[in-house]
Image: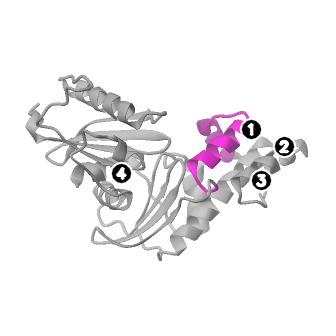
Amino acid sequence: MNASAIVAGIDCGSAACKGVLMQDGAIVAKAVKPTGWNPRETAEELLREMLLQCGPAAGPEGIPGGITVIATGYGRVAIPFAARAVTEITCHSRGAEYLLPGVRTVIDIGGQDSKAISLHNGKVLAFQMNDKCAAGTGRFLEMSAARMGVTLRELDGLLESGESCRLSSMCAVFADSEIVSLLAAGKSRQEVAGGVIDAVASRAAALAARVEVGLPLLLTGGLADLEGLRKALAVQLGCQVKTSPLSRFAGAIGAALS
């Protein structure tokens, strides 16, 4: 592979670090790792893993000179070998347009924040972010799943029953206590899981409503492959919500295209 034609996009989020290698507009390698406590080391490991997928390897200080690295995400400033850092809104918008040409709305639910972006012809018209409260984020879902003794994948399976109970609190701290109370009162895990997903979908839908939802709409982020969340969000918004097998890499793809 001609390394001079490769661009690496790294989206270093609060929970996971995602990366893609792109050559001539095509994705030739991708990888994801938990961010951990050291974003720089994680980004280096991520880049080495992707390079190994393509053949050549690189040590911590041995990034091939022909590769341009573009960083985004909350940890982008901690990646010193990046040629430049680009904002998350810009990268998620470009990545979404790559995954779904003509996309009008992007909802990204990340580990510690969520975003709603309105687009037209690939240009950002407006955006809203929830980065002050854990409710409505991946962290909230992880906490809730752990409280029920299941993984996120298993939580998605619980939603297949279609059962649901209502969570009255949208504060992540109080909701955790409410989940304990609901389970103690005899509510099933299926009902509580449905209530948790409905609460997250409701928060995401409210965020999207503030940027005027247009179609098609793409769900991105690490939770995009939870079918139960996609369905709940579609109900809340009253429209089709699309995803992609590469939805969690939208930010990294957008970085590589920047």
User: Do labels 2 and 1 touch, CB within 8 Å?
Assistant: yes
User: What span is colored magenta in the figure?
Assistant: 135-159
Is 146 covered by the magenta stretch?
yes
Which residue is tagged 1?
148
Q: Amino acid at mark 2?
A: Leu
Q: CA distance from mark 2 to mark 3?
A: 14 Å
Residue at x-position 86% and y-position 47%: 181
| Nearest to the observer: residue 49 or residue 69 | 69
Whichever of labels 3 and 1 marks the residue nearer the N terminus, that label is: 1
User: Do labels 2 and 3 touch, CB within 8 Å?
Assistant: no
Which residue is tagged 4?
251
Whichever of labels 3 and 4 marks the residue nearer the N terminus, that label is: 3
Secondary structure mostly seen in magenta is: helix
Is 170 covered by the magenta stretch?
no
Which residue is tagged 3?
174
Tag 4 secondary structure: helix
Which residue is tagged 2?
183
x and y percentages locating residue 3 in the rendered image: 11, 34
Instruction: Choose mark 2 or mark 4, whichever is in front.
Output: 4
Tag 2 secondary structure: helix
Q: CA distance from mark 3 to mark 4?
A: 31 Å
- Say few, some or many: other residues with alpha carbon within 10 Å of mark 3 (under 14 / 14 to 19 / 20 or more): few
- Say few, some or many: other residues with alpha carbon within 10 Å of mark 2 (under 14 / 14 to 19 / 20 or more): some
Occupied quadrant, residue 231: bottom right
Q: CA distance from mark 2 to mark 1?
A: 8 Å
Residue at x-position 48% and y-position 33%: 36
- Viewed as shown, does residue 190 lie left or right of 223? right
Q: Amino acid at mark 3?
A: Phe
Q: Amino acid at mark 1?
A: Met
